[in-house]
Amino acid sequence: MSDVAGSHDDRPHARDGVLTRRSFFKGAGVVAAGGLVGEAVHAAAHSMSLEPVRLSGEVEIELSINGALQKLKVEPRTTLLNALRNHCNPPLTGAKLVCDRGSCGACTVHLDGQPVYSCMTLAVACVGRAVTTIEGLGAPGQLNEVQQAFCEHDASMCGFCTPGFVMSISACLERKPDATLDEIKHACAGNLCRCGTYPHVFDAALSAGRALRAKGGKR
Ligand code: FES
Ligand code: FES
């Protein structure tokens, strides 16, 4: 699993207020994480120079994940995706590692309700923010409307892309339960499906929107 700096992050919401792997390594976004974690990140924040900052070792952070606080020991370079899958107890493997460079959307989670690529977000940048993964949206027998609609519309084949689509569509419908097909497609613009399930995914999304509206737009 890679922790190295990625190429770029094109998600509509991924860069807003989020310390990305790229900005972290450029040193420009470190202030956003000031006061969040251990000495290593403070040192980087205070440096604010274009000189390379060598960070090593682990820092202890506390993240709010699916409504519960978890203490994690991570390296400053550890991505949120890596932290979820390999540092949480129990591991949260719903977000998938596919491209690991911000181009497929399989790792999408919510950060303060906004969809972000967790492979392009540093774990240390998530302190003090609410992380929600696919596991936090619903559980067997208590699926949210989007998860339920994906089951009913057979919107998954290999399933690697599915959690990312569900997260993107859930965030979209949370904001706008009457989202149009075009708006749903726009919300999923950062998610790729190699199996070609798009028609079923969009049918499921529209169905979930109807279900949400039937409940008054509330979850
Ligand atoms: S694994 Fe994160 S965008 Fe592909
Ligand atoms: S269901 Fe296989 S990649 Fe989408």
Image (cartoon, grey):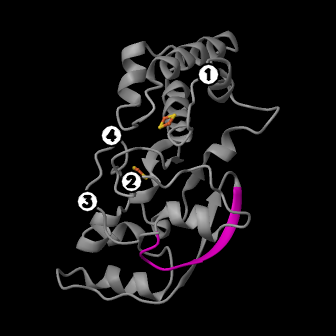
| Residue 180, percent from left and from top | 43, 13
Mark 2 vs mark 4: which is more N-terminal? 4
Where 10 falls versus 85 (above or below)? above
Up the image or down, 212 lies above or below 45; here it is above
User: Secondary structure beneath disc 3?
Assistant: loop
Q: Are marks 3 and 2 in contact (CB under 8 Å)?
A: no
Q: Residues within 10 Å of mark 3 (few under 14, many from 20)?
A: few
| 55 versus 85 height, above or below | below
Q: CA distance from mark 1 to mark 4?
A: 27 Å
Tell me how far mark 4 sits from mark 3, CA to CA.
16 Å
Q: Nearer the viewer, mark 1 or mark 4?
A: 1
Q: Earlier in the sequence, mark 4 or mark 3?
A: 3
Q: Residue placed at 38% from the left, 44% from the top?
A: 104
- Which residue corresponds to mark 3? 7
Q: Amino acid at mark 4?
A: Pro
Disc nearest the viewer among 1 and 3: 1
Number of residue marks: 4
**x and y percentages locating residue 197 in the rendered image:** 48, 25
Rounded to the nearest whole Å, what is the CA distance between mark 3 and mark 2? 11 Å
Queried whether the magenta region covers residue 72, the answer comes back as yes
User: How far is the residue under mark 2 from the one under mark 1?
Assistant: 24 Å
Residue shown at 57% from the left, 30% from the top: 156
Q: Please state the extent of the stretch shown in magenta in the rendering.
A: 68-78
Return the x and y of residue 3 as percentages of the image width and height. 41, 71
Amino acid type indicated by mark 1: Asp
* Quadrant occupied by the C terminus: top right
Residue shown at 56%/40% (left/top)?
Answer: 163
Query: Does the Cβ of the disc 1 residue fall within 8 Å of ligand 2?
Result: no
Q: Tell me the residue that label 4 is attached to.
A: 12
Residue type (three-letter) at the residue carrying disc 3: Ser
